[in-house]
Amino acid sequence: GAVVSQHPSWVICKSGTSVKIECRSLDFQATTMFWYRQFPKQSLMLMATSNEGSKATYEQGVEKDKFLINHASLTLSTLTVTSAHPEDSSFYICSASFSTTYNEQFFGPGTRLTVL
Amino acid sequence: DAKTTQPTSMDCAEGRAANLPCNHSTISGNEYVYWYRQIHSQGPQYIIHGLKNNETNEMASLIITEDRKSSTLILPHATLRDTAVYYCIGIIQGAQKLVFGQGTRLTINP
């Protein structure tokens, strides 16, 4: 149980285009979903936290107009990288939690974005 | 959240117990110790967590010192598939935001 999927698993796009990444909790309802970014040989950095039906909370330094997050249902959150540039190339990982009491998060397999 | 310190890397022979240390000397009384791991190019995976008592599940054991200033994650019979980066995180229950440090890169050797 507690499976989280991401789509696509990898994407290559041209500079200036927008890319949407989907995160789904397959067998549970996620009260909260999280988006992380990971550059090569670095640790995960939290980008934003989103609760279903409300606006996402972004971490300091993360541009909310560039990284649009939509959490329309308890099983789906999307991250849209708008006007992508090569420096946005990274490994994007989502996670989901079904409890506001515990800190156990279930992570998706990640999406590797390459911007040319 | 408590600052945690872990060795950068460790090696362990396949079949042996892998003992991964974590220092969290500034941990407060209501902060739990959580362990996650990340296999290369995958999302992290929850392993175990604890507050004061030692914990064991199907994946690992967690030994927390009595003063709670450090802990050890034990993989009892390491396999090649346990090669990963292991993260020790101190966090208040319900705080939700996980702050990942650099972790320990564990390599299991045949």
Image (cartoon, coloured by chain):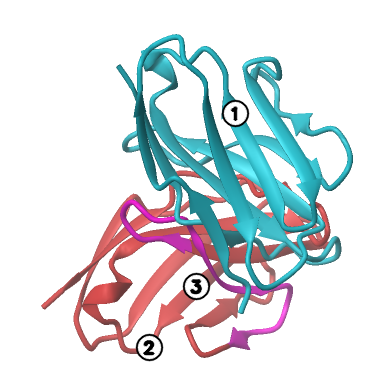
Chain colours: A cyan, B red
Q: Secondary structure at mark 2?
A: loop
Q: Secondary structure at mark 3?
A: strand
As drawn, A83 above or below B25: above
Q: Quadrant of the N terminus of chain A?
A: bottom right
Rendering quarter of residue B55: bottom right
Please report the bounds of the magenta region as a residue range.
Answer: B37-56
**Between tags 1 and 2, which lies in front?**
1
Label 3 amino acid? Answer: Thr
Rendering quarter of residue A65: top right
Asked if badge 1 and badge 3 are on a common chain, one would say no
The local crowd at label 1, few if under 14, some if 14 to 19, many if 20 or more residues have their Cα within 10 Å, is some
Q: Which mark is residue A100?
A: none
The local crowd at label 2, few if under 14, some if 14 to 19, many if 20 or more residues have their Cα within 10 Å, is some
As drawn, A57 above or below B41: above
Task: Kindly report the distance in space between the C-alpha atoms of the residues bearing marks 1 and 2.
Answer: 42 Å
| Residue positioned 31% across, 55% down in the render | B40
As drawn, B82 above or below A79: below
CB under 8 Å between callouts 1 and 2? no
Along the line of sight, the residue nearer the viewer: A36 or B14: A36
Rendering quarter of residue A48: top right
| Residue positioned 47% across, 15% down in the render | A17
Q: Position of residue A95 (x, y in %)?
A: 62, 53
Along the line of sight, the residue nearer the viewer: A47 or B25: A47
In the picture of the structure, the residue carrying the numbered disc 1 is: A80
**Between tags 2 and 3, which lies in front?**
2
Examine the rendering and report whether any part of residue B27 can be seen. Answer: no
Label 1 amino acid? Answer: Thr
Along the line of sight, the residue nearer the viewer: A7 or B46: A7
The mark tally for this picture is 3
In the picture of the structure, the residue carrying the numbered disc 2 is: B76
Q: Which mark is residue B72?
A: 3
